Amino acid sequence: MMDGTGQFLPESKRGLPTPWVAFCKVFGLAALFPKSSLFNRYHLGHLPQDEVSQIDILAGAFMFMRAEALQKVGLLDETFFMYGEDIDLSYRIKEGGYGVYYFPETRIIHYKGESTRKTSVNYVFMFYRAMMIFAEKHFSGRQGRLYTFLIRLAIYLRALLAIVSRGLAWLLPVLLDGLCLVVGAWLGARLVPAPLPLEVSPTWLVYFGLWLGAAFFSGAYDSPPSLYRLVRGMLWGSILLMAFSSVVSLIGETNKKHLLAAVLIGLAGMTLWRLLWHYKQYGHWRFGEAKAKRIAVIGSAKEVKRAAQLLRQAGAQEPVTQLAPQHSAADLRQIKEVIDIYKINELIFCGKDLAVSQIIEWMVQIHNSAVEFKILPENSAYIIGSSSKNTRGDYYALHIEVNLLNPYHRRNKAILNTLMGGLLLVLSPLLIWRLKSPKQFYKNAFASLVGLYQWVGLKATATSETKPAVFSPVDRITAERISSSAARQVEVVYAKEYTAFSDLAIVLKNLRQLDKRPATQ
């Protein structure tokens, strides 16, 4: 198996996850010694990638077996959800008297996505839970207890590491901005007369909290980054700070100049570190723009035109060049020349004009880590591809903006939900006389105040992760029951065009139903 850059995927061949093998993987020994037969038996790093070998485990993404073997040992075990079922099947095939072989003379491209993001806490629990199921099923006695202990330890350690790493990744920009404000306050004290005292105090913590909080709610830390949202947040924070200070008479006119100098210098520092980070990441100074794609499309004129149209619809860069394959030995040489001449960093192959085996062969022979490979399947409305096994990759298709998925609107929805819960509790003496079940109303209000319930949410299109919702978008239109298909259409429109006023309007229209029992579906 290869990833989207033509790199070999080590999970193409694996060893049986015994307690020792699991220990080496969990504690990083396999990663430290990738070629060791002692420490990296999980990926069998000591076996050559290009030689046929008898192994223990094959990946479920690329298996080929006799029907009689499957009939003898049984189908995939549905106890496993996303991981581990291929390990279990390979193990049962060996136990059934058959051999499991790694065969490198045929290949596939294995594009991976959301399920393999290694920093995800969900991935940690899914992966190691599968290992636990395997151990309980096939190991017993002391070996089984040792395996279970190692897996439980791995779950806690890796989950903790995933939570800490994601937390640090989120906090780092905030900490850098805070440092810029500290520098701004320090320099500002040297630029204005009679500045505020610089020692650490609750007053300065309030000032920094207002600035950084306003930046957060303005979307300064949302992706993709935006200098406009940062400046807007700092501006609103300064306005709130000046208004608050004037009301409570904490500072004088001279001290306000110190705060103004602090925020302006701090804002310059925030902008500078963002620009430097962006340049290091993408190689240009156009903040907010990703690394420019220099795309070449390999295929017939008709398919190239279709690829270009899809790229336009997706808001991506259009191809800088194209190449019609001649289905001869000269094709590969021409592709390499196109990459060199036009500095191509993304190749799109048209599946209608090229055999998959040909695409894979070219990917292996080009073997340029700076080039990503994508495929336009025949008669499809999308272009697929991922540059590595740990990234979601690009998915070029017709772009549809869904407001409810936007971090800015999601944050506003959460804030409004909490505020409505608090306000309705305050007004409850006036409201409960119109309600049939005051107890349910108080439960709804308290649960929404702490974020367990939402006043307005999806029901017809709810998932297992959707919070219970008192009302749905349908309640803005009618109090009568409508068909499930009609309800789904209403919820799609709600999600696409969502604003905080949508939730407010639905709650105001249904004040007599505030004691309604929430539902997720």
Image (tube, helix red, strand yellow):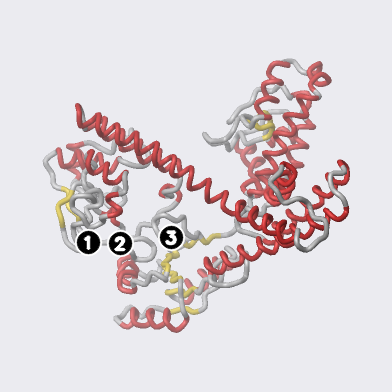
**Where residue 229 is drawn, which disc sits there?**
none
Query: What is the distance, in whole Å, between disc 1 and disc 3 at their CAs?
Result: 22 Å
| Residue 180: quadrant of the picture | bottom right
Q: Position of residue 474 (x, y in %)?
A: 69, 35
Q: Position of residue 504 (x, y in %)?
A: 76, 37
* Residue type marked 2: Phe
Depth check: 131 or 72 in front?
Answer: 131
Q: Position of residue 37 (x, y in %)?
A: 18, 53
Which residue appears at 33% of the width and 33% of the height?
79
Few, some or many C-alpha atoms within 10 Å of disc 2 (few <14, some 14-19, many ≥20)? some
Q: Is residue 298 left or right of residue 249?
A: left
Which residue appears at 65% of the width and 44% of the height?
410
Q: Quadrant of the C terminus?
A: top right
* Residue type marked 3: Ser
Q: Quadrant of the N terminus?
A: bottom left
Which-is-in-front pick, marks 1 and 3? 1
Decide which of tag 2 and tag 1 comes sooner along the chain. Answer: 2
Residue 226's place in the image compared with 361, above or below, is above
**Where residue 386 is drawn, which disc sits there?**
3
Q: Callout 3: helix, strand or loop?
A: loop
Q: Callout 1: helix, strand or loop?
A: loop
Decide which of tag 1 and tag 3 comes sooner along the chain. Answer: 1
Mark 2 and 1 residues: CB-CB less than 8 Å, in contact? yes
Mark 1 and 3 residues: CB-CB less than 8 Å, in contact? no
Q: Which residue is mark 2?
A: 8
**Where residue 49 is drawn, which disc sits there?**
1
Which residue appears at 42% of the width and 43% of the height?
123
Q: Position of residue 93 (x, y in %)?
A: 18, 41
Residue 502's place in the image compared with 431, above or below, is below
